[in-house]
Amino acid sequence: KLGGQYADYIAHSLQAYRSGARGGSSTPDLMGSQAKELTDQQIADLAAYFHSVKGALRDLHDVD
């Protein structure tokens, strides 16, 4: 589900998980533990990678 996401959204989300500002009841343990050791460069790289992967995201642009 990350494929095709906007890079800035992924980067912002990972930064929030890393800082502890984002997370739910089970999410902080999983995502927080994964993101807490990431550097800014690694976050940027991951965001760029997942943005470049073809995903199933669709918007309503050009929908009749």
Image (spheres, rainbow, N blue to C red):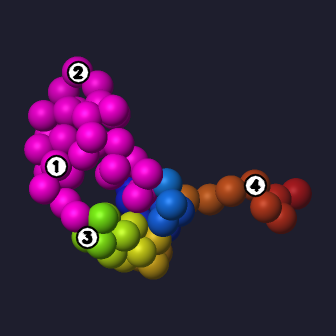
Query: Dot 3 corresponds to which residue?
Result: 42
Identify which residue, 64 or 48, lies in the foreground.
48
Mark found first going from the N terminus, 2 or 4: 2
* Dots 1, 3 in contact, CB < 8 A: no
Q: Nearer the viewer, mark 4 or mark 3?
A: 3
According to the picture, the residue beneath numbered tag 4 turns out to be 60
Q: Depth check: 44 or 59 in front?
A: 44
Q: Which residues are magenta?
A: 10-39
**Real-space Cα separation, disc 1 to disc 4, in angstroms:** 35 Å
Q: Secondary structure at mark 4?
A: loop
- What numbered label is drawn on residue 25? 2
- The residue shown at (34%, 50%) is 15
Q: Is residue 27 magenta?
A: yes
Judging from the image, what secondary structure is the residue with disc 1 in?
A: loop
Q: Residue 36 has which mark? A: 1
Residue shown at the point (37%, 70%) measured from the top left? 44
Looking at the picture, which amino acid does disc 1 mark? Lys
Quadrant into which the C terminus falls: bottom right
Q: Mark 4 or mark 1, which is nearer the start of the sequence? A: 1
Q: Position of residue 62 (x, y in %)?
A: 83, 64
